[in-house]
Image (cartoon, rainbow, N blue to C red):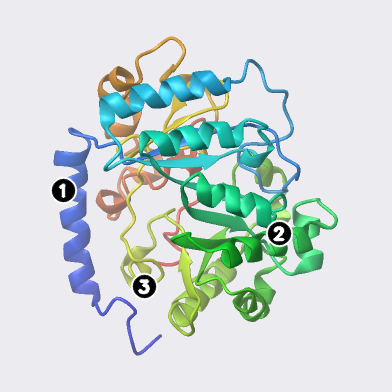
Amino acid sequence: MFLTSNSGLGVKEKTGHLKQLADYRENTLRKHPELRSLFIEMTGKCNEHCRHCGSNCGDFEEVNPLTAQEIMDFLDRVKRDFGTDKLRLCITGGEPLLRRDFFEIMNYAKKLGFKWGMTSNGTLITDEVAEKLRQAGMRTVSVSLDGLKEYHEWFRQSPGSYEKTVKGIRALLENGGFEHVQITTVITHKNIGDLEKMYKEFGKIGVKSWRVINIEPIGRAKEQQELILSKEEYRKLFDFIREYRFKGPMEVCYGCSHFLGEEYEREVRKWYFLCNAGVYVASVMYNGDITACLDIERRPELVQGNIRTDDFKKVWEEKFDIYRTDWRKTGKCADCEHYSFCAGDAFHSWNFDEMEPNLCFKGILF
C-alpha cells in the first residue's frame, strides 16, 4: 500500500465524488447528451496486423468506403449543427495515413475550424509528413509502441516496424507545434515483465506522456487468451502506473476504460471512470455507419444510422438509446453494490450475447 496518493484524496472523498458522478450520469448526461468527441474512421486498412486489434483491421475488404467529398460534406454539416468550439475530431483507422486523400480532408477540417487529433502506428510518419500534419492543424497524436523491439514487432506482426515507429515519434517531436505527443502501449501477459525497461527506453525518446492500457478481451485478442493478464498481473500493472505516474518528466497514465474501485480511481488517471459512448462520443465508420465508440463490437443492432442516408444531428439527438438507458443491471451486475458507479462498465468490453462484462475488476482490484 502506498503512503501517498497521486490524487490527494481519500476513499471517503472519492466515494462521494463517484456518487455525484453517478447522479450526473443518470439525471443529466443521459437525458441531455453532449457531443464532445467525434471519431472518424478514415479506413479499415492497416499496414500492420496487431494480435489484439479490436476492429480486426486488415482482415476485411472495405465495402463502399466514404469518399473524401462525402467526408468533407459531412464535416460541413457537423460544423453547421454542432459548431467547432466544443467538439474535437478524433481521426483513426486502420492506419489513417494510408488514405491518399488524408491531407485533403484534414486541411479542409482545419479550414472549417475543427480541432483534431489522431491515433497512428507511426510507421508512415517522416519529417515531411510531420510537417504536413502540423500545417493541417493536428494538435494531438497518440502513437502505438507496444514494447521493446523484438516484442513490438512480434505483437504487431510487422518486421522492421519498431525503428520506423520510433523515427515517426521523433519526427513529430522535432517538428514541434503539437500540443501533445503520446505513446500508447498495450500490456499483455508477455510484455508486462518489461514495464520498467519500457519506461526507461520510451523516456529516452522524449515524449512527456505514456499511456499504458491492458489488452482487452475483444477483437483478435479473444482468440489469444495466452495474452490476457492474470489477476496478479492486473494489480502489478496498476501499482506500476501509480508508482511511476509522476516519477519523472514522462507522465504515466491509464486509459479511459473500466471502473477500478475507490483505491485506484484517480490514482492512475486524472478522471473517474465514465463510459463516454453515446453520451459524449459518437463515431463514423469508414463506410459511413454511425455508432458510439469504434472499439465496441460491430453488431448490426448497434449501428444508429449512416451519414449517407440519415441526418447525423437527428441521429445523435433521437437515437443511441442503448447507451442512454439503464438496461445492463442484469446477471452478475444485478446485485452488485458498485453498479451505480460503473453502470455495467465500458461498452466496448460488454458481452452482448452473455449479457455481462467480458472484463470486470471486481474481485481483482476491489
Q: Position of residue 128 (x, y in %)?
A: 67, 52
> Could you say which is closer to the camera, residue 255 or residue 86?
86
* Residue 290 falls left or right of residue 86: right
Count of marks, rendered view: 3
Q: Would you say residue 336 is visible in this rendering?
A: yes
| Earlier-in-chain disc, 2 versus 3 | 2
How far across and how far down the image is residue 307, in percent? 44, 17
Q: Which residue is mark 2?
A: 165
Q: Give the alpha-carbon distance from disc 2 to disc 3, as whole Å.
A: 29 Å
Tag 2: residue type?
Thr
Please state, as top left, top right, bottom left or bottom right, where the N terminus lies in the image: bottom left
What's the residue at 55%, 28% (across, down)?
A: 298
Which residue in the protein does label 1 denote? 23
Pointer 3 and pointer 1: residues touching (CB < 8 Å)?
no
**Which residue is drawn at the image coordinates 50% and 18% (left, top)?**
70
First in sequence, mark 1 or 2: give its number: 1
Rounded to the nearest angstrom, the CA distance separating label 1 from label 2 is 43 Å
Given residues 48 and 239, the one toward you in this image is 48
Q: Quadrant of residue 334?
A: top left
Which residue lies at the image location 47% right of the left edge and 82% below the top edge? 243
Give the left or right position of residue 315, taking residue 150 as reference. Answer: left
Q: Quadrant of residue 41?
A: top right
Secondary structure at badge 1 equals: helix
Q: Amino acid at mark 3?
A: Glu
Pair 3/1: label in front: 3
Q: Is residue 189 above or below residue 293?
A: below
According to the picture, the residue beneath numbered tag 3 turns out to be 267
Q: Of residues 19 and 240, which is closer to you in this image?
A: 240
Label 3 crowd bin: few (<14), some (14–19), many (20+), radius 10 Å? many
Q: Quarter of the image containing the C terminus?
A: bottom left
Residue extending farthest to the top is 309
